[in-house]
Image (cartoon, rainbow, N blue to C red):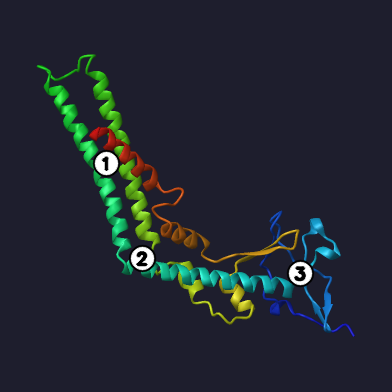
Amino acid sequence: MGGFKMKISENPVNKRVYCGDCGCFLRSSDNYYRENGRQLLAYCCQTRKSRENYVTTPEICVAVKAQLLAERQAAIDAKCRIEAFISSGEYKQMEERYLDCIHFWMNVIHENCTKINSLYKRQEKPVHLPKDLQPKYDALCASSQKAAENAAALEAELYRFHKGFSLENKWLRLYSSLPEELDITPEITRTYVPRIFLFHNKHVTIKPNAEDAKKELLWCLSLPDAQDSAYVTIHREQHRKEDSKNA
């Protein structure tokens, strides 16, 4: 009376479970848990293989479902934030902040070029600068190079913002359409769960589909205060330059 075994084709997490500690692919164990007359597939990393470390397919499915619902809610929240951001005019304001900052650094380059021309105009034969003017020339060139780097970094970040901030984001569209009432089936995992990680402490976590698109969108939503945002550093530098100019 051994009950019956789940067919591999019916196993919703088949070929998707990996060890979260060593990264190895995990196969369903030949050892089955018996519950209510049903023999359940279980997973465990070979490096920690013992009966108490096995995690059954239903246990994994419960964890996966909870995380998918959390992913769904995160996508819905992001979608609402995008819609509010656009309708409130903040999207346009963000563009203008970047463009104003870029314009500031392009003006710095223009002013430095004018000053360099002025240095040369002081000479009867504007070929080589005398030693006393060379430091000013070098400082202006260095300032222009820095300004060009700042403008280029801001333009790249603005392009990234335009590209990543979209309701057509692949992760957003995929997970915001996930039904709230769902069962973990092979079809669901094929669409939404490329990998499942099982750790030695039995913690289960998933890798969502379109993860790079998710990171890009969440980064855009955190602008201009994202930790790696060029805007924060360069805008602070802009204020220092304006303050020293007005002093």
In the picture of the structure, the residue carrying the numbered disc 1 is 105
Question: In the structure shown, which secondary structural element does the residue marked by tag 2 occupy?
Answer: helix
Mark 3 and mark 2: span between their CA atoms?
46 Å
Residue visible at 23% across and 37% down? 109
Residue visible at 27% across and 55% down? 96
Residue visible at 33% across and 41% down? 150
Question: In the structure shown, which secondary structural element does the residue marked by tag 1 occupy?
Answer: helix
Residue at the limit of the structure toward the left, as seen here: 124
Would you identify the image quadrant in which residue 93 lies? bottom left
The percent coordinates of residue 59 (x first, y second) are 73, 72
The percent coordinates of residue 57 (x first, y second) are 73, 73
Question: In the structure shown, which secondary structural element does the residue marked by tag 3 occupy?
Answer: loop
Mark 1 and mark 2: span between their CA atoms?
27 Å
Give neighbour class at mark 2: few <14, some 14-19, many 20+ (Cα, 10 Å): some
In the picture of the structure, the residue carrying the numbered disc 2 is 85
Left or right of 1 in this view: 22:
left
Give neighbour class at mark 1: few <14, some 14-19, many 20+ (Cα, 10 Å): many
In the picture of the structure, the residue carrying the numbered disc 3 is 28
Q: What residue type is disc 3 on?
A: Ser
Of callouts 3 and 1, the N-terminal one: 3
Position of residue 124 relative to residue 17, above or below, is: above
Query: Do the residues bearing badges 3 and 2 touch, measured as CB atoms within 8 Å?
Result: no
Mark 3 and mark 1: span between their CA atoms?
59 Å
- Quadrant holding the N terminus: bottom right
Q: What residue type is disc 2 on?
A: Phe
